[in-house]
Image (tube, rainbow, N blue to C red):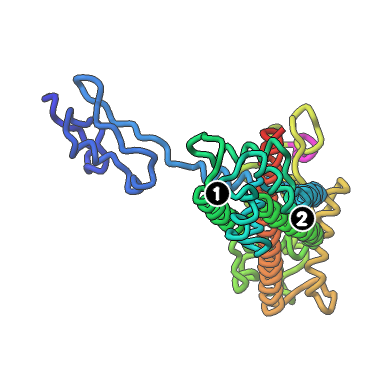
Amino acid sequence: MSRRASVWTPRKTRCIWANQGSLAEALKFVPSSHSRWSFAPSTNHGNAFGVVPKFPMPRMLGRQRAVAVEKLEIPSEELLEIAELLRGKATALEEQTEIPSVELQLGFGLLDGLFAIARCLKDWDTRGKGEIIKGGMRNNLRHMGLQVSGVDADALFDSWDADKGGTLDLEELRVCLQRAQERAQAKRDAPDPLKQRAQSLRHKARIAEQAAHLADEADALEEQLAELTANIAKRADVRLGTLLQARMVKPAAVVTHWSNAKGEHAGELSRLDFRKAVLRLFKSHGSSSGARDGDGDGDLVEKTAYSPRFKKTPLTPAQQQLELAKALMSRQSPRCSTPEEQALAREIDSVFLMFDADNGGYLDEAEAKAMIKTLQGVANASGSELRTKQVEARVMRARANKLGLMSREAIEQMDAMDAMEA
């Protein structure tokens, strides 16, 4: 066989052996959803005989994160505490006052009209020589009512004295005062970083409070869901209707297939026939996962649901009902020996009696058909209500968790900034 040949299945639906070095053949292994894959498949086969290219798994990180967020539960108490911390930090930032520099104080005074540049040039030239010395500038700033120390005044003078001659002429002083006014205007126009940060923290605090409110609503919906699930689980008609839907029982064929009555009750469904039919449905519905009675004594329930020698993990209530139904069917008797079997039989009989208006123990074809339709309708309505409540609870919890994670990130960022400033 040539090293460049390909081996296909008889109907050419799958390539078993790819030819070496052919990009067209290698691309036949690319799945139809290749655009969602993390990177393009490699066409380097690695040896002289050629191997089937191996492709990476699709990206599932987004879905895994979404599932993790859905399963997360952030209590409302934690979110309210986060909101209080964020609001307290915002208040502390708003109370902080930044003392402007001497140049900015002078520029703010010029902007506000407290003094003018021409007036400063005239008043500061006390010696009439057209120049200002360092000591005179210090006294003039203090006479103007500015909060300035001698060190700050001397530092401002040195920054304005470009030639380092020890004096400032009137033209240099005019330019410096104009520059101080421009810088003050730029400072006033620029947003205050402390106020901006405080506003951001207050916004995040409101998000945390909203997340706490959503978390409370999610808790309430989950409690309603648990209560609804418990109420549905207690209703025998809903459970039986669900079983009839799962087994796709046709209402028109119930009497034909289930009834064994003869004589005057021919064509009618008896309570005993109904119980046996339901038990058969239980048995067939759980036959794929149920245990088997190895010794044939019909003692199935005791060896699975209640005996640790045969069962390592306990059965769920639904699985126990399936095992009880199998035990009843294995005995082929309407009599029930254990309390659990009796309870299951009573539940089946109680559903039958709900539709047996005359308590005669038989339902005609129309009554049996109406019973099956009603049970399936009740099961469908209950299932729809349960699914709706599940979606509501899941969506509310996801919204609360999304905002809660944002609140946690906000408090972590605040702590990180405080650590950097410390």
Answer whether residue 21 is visible to the viewer in this image.
yes
Near mark 1 (Cα within 10 A), the count class, few <14, some 14-19 or many ≥20, is some
In the rendered image of this protein, does residue 306 appear above or below residue 51?
below
Q: Position of residue 171 (x, y in %)?
A: 50, 51
Which residue is found at the position 23% from the left and 30% from the top?
A: 17
**In which quadrant of the rendered image does the N terminus lie?**
top left
Which residue is found at the position 24% from the left and 36% from the top?
A: 15
Near mark 2 (Cα within 10 A), the count class, few <14, some 14-19 or many ≥20, is many
Residues in magenta, as a range: 297-303
The secondary structure type at the circle numbered 2 is helix
Mark 1 belongs to which amino acid? Gly
Would you identify the image quadrant in which residue 49 lies? top left
> Pointer 1: what residue?
130
**In which quadrant of the rendered image does the C terminus lie?**
top right
Q: Is residue 101 magenta?
A: no
The secondary structure type at the circle numbered 1 is loop
Q: Position of residue 134 (x, y in %)?
A: 63, 39
Of callouts 2 and 1, which one flags the residue occurring earlier in the amino acid sequence? 1
Q: Which mark is residue 212?
A: 2
Furthest toward the front, the residue is: 128
Furthest toward the right, the residue is: 339
